[in-house]
Amino acid sequence: MKKTYLCFSIISISLLLLISEGAFAVDVEAGRVISTRCAICHGQDGEGNGAPKSKISGMDADTFIKLVNDYKSGACKNVMMERFTKNLSDEDIKNLAAYYGAK
């Protein structure tokens, strides 16, 4: 009886972990779609437009997420970035981070 309960518990926990990983997975393609709004200042693939700090391709995901959230919250001031980030969800930001990080 204990072995059956233990096996059932292990299988249940494993399935929950697999399901939860899928729920929090980033979507690079969704990030690519959202990135069209970023291309005006950051270039088609995030390579930058020559302006300081405009290159975002290859940026570490954690750094990208922190920066975007700082603009979204107003902790970093930039009128354009505040305007573009205010409607991004946490999922959108993670997807963008995955897209640009993969460049």
Image (cartoon, rainbow, N blue to C red):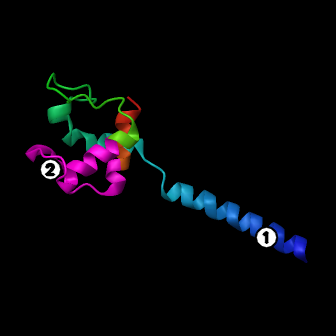
Question: Residue 22 location, x and y as percent?
Answer: 53, 55
* Quadrant in the rendering for residue 15: bottom right
Task: Locate the C terminus and report the quarter of the image it occupies.
Answer: top left
Number of the front mark, 2 or 1: 2
The kind of secondary structure the magenta stretch mainly shows is helix
Instruction: Give, as a three-letter code, the residue at label 2.
Output: Glu
Q: Is residue 98 visible?
A: no
Q: Which residues are magenta?
A: 64-93
Which residue reaches farthest left?
A: 79
Going 18% across and 46% down the picture, which residue do you hit? 76
Along the horizontal axis of the image, is 56 left or right of 62?
Answer: left
Would you name the residue on which mark 2 appears? Answer: 82
Up/down of 75 relative to 41, above or below: below
For the N terminus, the image quarter is: bottom right
**Residue highlighted by disc 1:** 8
Query: Crowding near pointer 1: few (<14 within 10 Å), some, many (20+)?
Result: few
